[in-house]
């Protein structure tokens, strides 16, 4: 799945979500964002981080912390300072897969939402499979006084261990959670000498009095708790040591082969130790010390790496370590719904040569595994990245945004420079009399709109090579399907039918010469008018998620009723058409499980391709006249259509 929409409402620098925000039109693309300082660029970073991190805020303490984030005026509050008292601060992400199936992640200050996020394994896995990188994450690696040891354990404990699952340590708890548990010592037990006192079980503890057989047995169980605890510590130490060895090896390969650095690093792990006493767990934290065993072919000439190496080399080290970790899916869920790299001004300390290296790594290697969200306040780097993406022929995979502080707004807030859409670009070329270029962009916009609007059954067809494999229809096929789709959805096709008349101009924009230029210009203007009408028809927002109840009841004037119990197999989407009332799209597969005829229940599973089909079929069976707009005929898992409209 990919991120398609990011809703940020009254959170940090963002006020109420604007309906035309480009963040609602990400559509699964990678993001390159330029934002001047103070424009709210970093709010995007922290909104996504807060949303995914909510799944790692455990228990009542975690719930309380999240509530504080969404409490205006709280010490930890992240609510926009200019938000009203009833601010409805939230962050919501809409993810979609290649077939259009969607899922929603949401976090706000409400109890039910927080509990859902805390227990949501999908959000948790998405965080583990994603990574957040900014300048501070890299800066922490070497921001150490000359007199101190270069211990990176705190960095790993905060940035890495909470988000990796090492099977040799635990199959259910991350390395960070296990570390937190074992660093607190073994589970305490009752002191035989003082019933009011709890102590740590340990081999030094010896009761002064003779114990009964029963107490000896209990004492042995206490000792076994200590033995089990020591075993857990050893297991954690051994597995972390092995993990760091793998990271070390791969990081050195990246430093040599990608960053072209002529030195090696060594992550030397000093294991955690314990010396448990009655009242003290005797825990001593491990260390991850970084050394430079070889520098420009010479061994052990660098004694204190954090003082000797410059910031650019440290950034290369930090990125090499981080890249080594994100390349390894052994300890992270490769099947997570979202796998994203969110990068905010991470490359500030790199010169242009190293920036080029990092961009190549992101655009050639990591883009294959992650959806990239790359943000910077450096205009030259933004333009450099745009050119690099264009040179690689990947512009269509990216959405480029520019952010500024809105100086005309009543309160400070982000301003997004309007996007130049394919249609706007086509109009520009039309005015420049470059008709073939205009036609190319009109074709692109038509494909975008029809692909977004038409359900899967209208967009796919059997492959000529293998009828069991579905492939995308050509633009010609999409245009021919539009009328049929509009008929079923009761969409006015009158203003769209010219798209059939002028489809040849769309399909062959380069097949015109100067002789027929005036006629071609007229065709292009007509197509623009059709596209503008088509843009006002949208089928996007989610009304109802899959695998949820969607029952309905049919009533006769004489009091007889016929109720149907069913579940949707796909999401139900909202259909908007010009000034017509909002309604649902009928293209949702569903499964009827039973129906009741005046209280007499018949259990009979039936599958239907659309909501229209199931509604019309049941009306025919019971002799009830059908309605054209069936949006309000259904009960959406306990909610009515008008109530749902208030929330989307």
Image: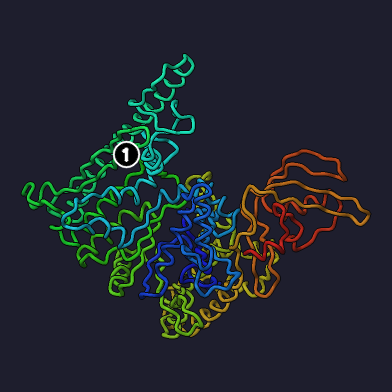
Residue drawn 37% across the image and 73% down it: 35
Which residue does the numbered mark 1 point to in the structure image? 283
Q: Residue extending furthest right?
A: 558
Q: Residue at x 53, y 60 (%)?
A: 92
Question: Is residue 365 shown to the viewer in this render?
Answer: yes
* Residue 591 picture location, percent across and down: 69, 45
> How far from the left and from the top, in percent, is residue 354?
21, 62
How many numbered discs sit on the rendered protein? 1
Quadrant in the rendering for residue 490: bottom right
Which quadrant is the C terminus positioned in?
bottom right
Q: Nearer the viewer, residue 454 or 525?
A: 454
Q: Secondary structure at mark 1?
A: loop
Dividing the picture into quarters, in which one does residue 16 lie? bottom right
Give the x, y percent position of residue 365: 31, 54
In percent of the image, x 42 and y 52: which residue is there?
339
The type of colouring in the image is rainbow
Q: Position of residue 70 (x, y in %)?
A: 53, 63
Few, some or many residues within 10 Å of mark 1 (<14, 14–19, 20+):
some
Residue 428 as seen in the image, left or right of residue 258:
right
Q: Residue at x 48, y 50 (%)?
A: 57
When the figure is inspected, residue 381 is found, relative to residue 228, above or below; the finding is: below
Q: Nearer the viewer, residue 644 or 79?
A: 79
| 170 displayed left or right of 155 | right
Task: Name, please, the residue furthest toward the top.
Answer: 213
* Residue 102 visible to an observer of this rendering: no
């Amino acid at each position: 799945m990919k991120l398609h929409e990011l809703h940020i409402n009254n959170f940090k620098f963002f006020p109420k979500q604007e309906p035309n925000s480009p963040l609602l039109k990400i559509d699964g693309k990678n993001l390159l964002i330029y934002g001047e300082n103070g424009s709210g660029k970093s709010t995007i970073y922290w909104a996504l981080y807060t949303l995914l991190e909510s799944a790692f805020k455990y228990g009542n303490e975690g719930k309380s912390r999240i509530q504080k984030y969404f409490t205006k005026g709280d010490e930890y509050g992240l609510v926009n300072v200019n938000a009203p008292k009833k601010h409805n601060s939230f962050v919501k992400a809409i993810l979609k897969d290649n077939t259009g199936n969607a899922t929603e992640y949401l976090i706000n200050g409400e109890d039910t939402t927080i509990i859902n996020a805390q227990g949501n394994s999908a959000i948790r896995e998405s965080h583990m499979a994603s990574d957040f990188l900014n300048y501070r994450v890299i800066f922490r690696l070497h921001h150490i006084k000359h007199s101190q040891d270069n211990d990176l354990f705190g960095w790993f404990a905060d940035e890495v261990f909470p988000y990796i699952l090492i099977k040799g340590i635990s199959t259910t708890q991350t390395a960070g959670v296990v570390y937190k548990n074992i660093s607190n010592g073994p589970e305490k037990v009752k002191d035989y000498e003082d019933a009011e006192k709890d102590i740590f079980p340990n081999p030094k503890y010896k009761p002064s009095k003779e114990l009964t057989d029963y107490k000896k047995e209990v004492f042995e169980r206490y000792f076994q708790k200590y033995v089990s605890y020591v075993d857990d510590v050893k297991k954690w130490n051994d597995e972390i040591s092995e993990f760091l060895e793998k990271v070390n090896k791969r990081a050195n390969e990246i430093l040599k082969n990608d960053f072209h650095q002529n030195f090696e690093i060594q992550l030397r792990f000093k294991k955690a130790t314990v010396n448990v006493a009655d009242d003290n767990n005797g825990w001593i934290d491990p260390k991850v010390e970084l050394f430079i065993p070889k520098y420009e072919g010479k061994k052990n000439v660098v004694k204190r790496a954090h003082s000797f190496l410059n910031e650019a080399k440290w950034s290369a080290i930090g990125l090499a370590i981080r890249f080594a970790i994100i390349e390894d899916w052994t300890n992270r869920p490769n099947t997570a719904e979202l796998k994203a790299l969110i990068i905010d001004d991470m490359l500030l300390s790199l010169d242009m040569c190293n920036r080029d290296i990092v961009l190549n790594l992101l655009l050639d290697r990591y883009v294959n595994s992650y959806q990239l969200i790359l943000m910077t306040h450096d205009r030259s780097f933004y333009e450099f990245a745009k050119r690099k993406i264009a040179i690689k022929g990947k512009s269509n995979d990216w959405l480029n945004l520019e952010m500024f502080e809105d100086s005309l707004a009543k309160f400070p807030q982000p301003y997004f420079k309007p996007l130049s859409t394919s249609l706007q670009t086509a109009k520009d070329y039309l005015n420049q009399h470059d008709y073939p270029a205009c036609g190319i962009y009109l074709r692109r916009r038509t494909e975008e709109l029809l692909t977004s609007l038409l359900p899967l059954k209208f967009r796919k067809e059997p492959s000529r090579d293998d009828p069991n494999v579905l492939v995308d229809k050509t633009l010609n096929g999409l245009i021919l399907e539009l009328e049929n789709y509009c008929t079923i959805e009761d969409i006015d096709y009158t203003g769209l039918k010219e798209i059939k008349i002028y489809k040849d101009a769309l399909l062959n924009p380069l097949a015109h010469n100067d002789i027929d230029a005036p006629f071609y210009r007229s065709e292009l203007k007509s197509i623009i008018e059709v596209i503008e009408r088509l843009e006002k028809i949208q089928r996007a927002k989610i009304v109802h998620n899959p695998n949820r109840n969607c029952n309905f009841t049919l009533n006769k004037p004489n009091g007889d009723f016929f109720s149907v119990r069913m579940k949707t197999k796909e999401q139900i989407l909202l259909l908007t058409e010009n000034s017509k009332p909002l309604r649902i799209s009928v293209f949702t597969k569903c499964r009827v499980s039973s129906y009741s005829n005046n209280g007499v229940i018949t259990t009979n599973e039936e599958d239907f391709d659309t909501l229209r089909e199931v509604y019309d079929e049941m009306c025919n069976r019971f002799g009830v006249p059908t309605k054209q707009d069936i949006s309000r005929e259904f009960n959406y898992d306990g909610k009515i259509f008008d109530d749902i409209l208030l929330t989307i």
